Image: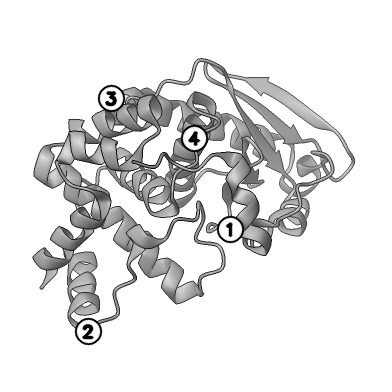
Amino acid sequence: MPRLPRVASLVLLGALLAWPAPAADRGADGRFDKRESSHFVLYQDVDIDRSGGWSGSVRFERDVLASLERGYDQLDDLLGLRPRRRLPVWVYDPGIFDAQFAGRFRFRVAGFFGDAIRVRGDTAVTVPISRTLHHELVHAAFAAEAPSLVLPAWLNEGIAEWFESRTHGKRRLSPGEWSYLERVERGGAWVPVTSFAYPSFVGLRADAAGLAYLESYALIDHVARRHGEPAIARLVGELIRTRNLDRSFRKVTRMRPAELEAALREELR
């Protein structure tokens, strides 16, 4: 059975993933403050003080770390992930963030890129920002635990979406999400995500990408409903250990990914 593709094979993606990395992590004036917590090291652009005020910028960086630490506490329980090194977090002046990362991330406020969580500076961590931080934490944890492991987008994003929802008190797809997927399936508009082998949904139209994210979340939710939430952590462990997609899914769910997707679609009809 073929193994998951390694980084070297991603050359075939060409322009799809040809996002140039920033030449350096530089704030508006080239300087960052450093703050550490138990599991993260945060660098904040000192220029944020000018727009949000010193007290606002300090409160924001503390709130970012507090939110990430709360997410970290659940990584092991829900996903079996416990990175052994501090994860880097960069907080940018909003203008610098928009200039460097506009269009690269699904979320306007944060994203995972180049081995670190990148955050758009603000004065308070709202619930949507906290959810986004927990989503990106999953990507950072995978990168720290298994840097050579490249997951297909539907699995990578589906696990992150599931974890984000779970850490904020949502255990299942909402009735509205389920009804929407029923209409999609019955209307013949389903995006077959398990055949999408690329590690990113970059390149899909906005509407198609939004549907792909929801379907991906639904697939992980399907595993949790049918096999129990601990199955997600077992699946993650198998993926890291074997780096074999089909083998990991067969061991945990007794289905290959395409069969899992077919079962979910049948349930929606």
| Residue 239, percent from left and from top | 35, 33
Q: Would you call the spot at circle 2 few (<14 residues within 10 Å), some (14-19), or many (20 or more)?
A: few
Mark 2 lies on residue: 187
The answer to which of 17 and 100 lies nearer the viewer is: 17
Asked if one can make out residue 123 in the rendered structure from this viewpoint, the answer is: no
Q: Which mark is on residue 108?
A: 1
Q: Residue at x 68, y 63 (%)?
A: 15
The answer to which of 25 and 61 lies nearer the viewer is: 25
Left or right relative to 136: residue 169: left
Mark 3 lies on residue: 77
Give the spatial CA distance, label 2 vs label 3: 38 Å
Give the spatial CA distance, label 1 vs label 4: 26 Å
Task: Tell me which amino acid carries mark 3.
Answer: Asp
Give the spatial CA distance, label 4 vs label 3: 21 Å
- Sequence-wise, the earlier of marks 3 and 1 is 3
Q: Is residue 195 above or below residue 29?
A: below
Asked if one can make out residue 230 in the rendered structure from this viewpoint, the answer is: yes
Furthest residue to the front? 1
Task: Tell me which amino acid carries mark 2.
Answer: Gly
Q: Is residue 7 above or below residue 215?
A: above
Mark 4 lies on residue: 149
The answer to which of 169 and 117 lies nearer the viewer is: 117
Give the spatial CA distance, label 4 vs label 2: 35 Å
Left or right relative to 111: residue 28: right
Left or right relative to 146: residue 244: left
- Sequence-wise, the earlier of marks 4 and 2 is 4
Left or right relative to 226: residue 88: right
| Residue 209, percent from left and from top | 45, 67
Task: Tell me which amino acid carries mark 1.
Answer: Arg
- Sequence-wise, the earlier of marks 2 and 3 is 3
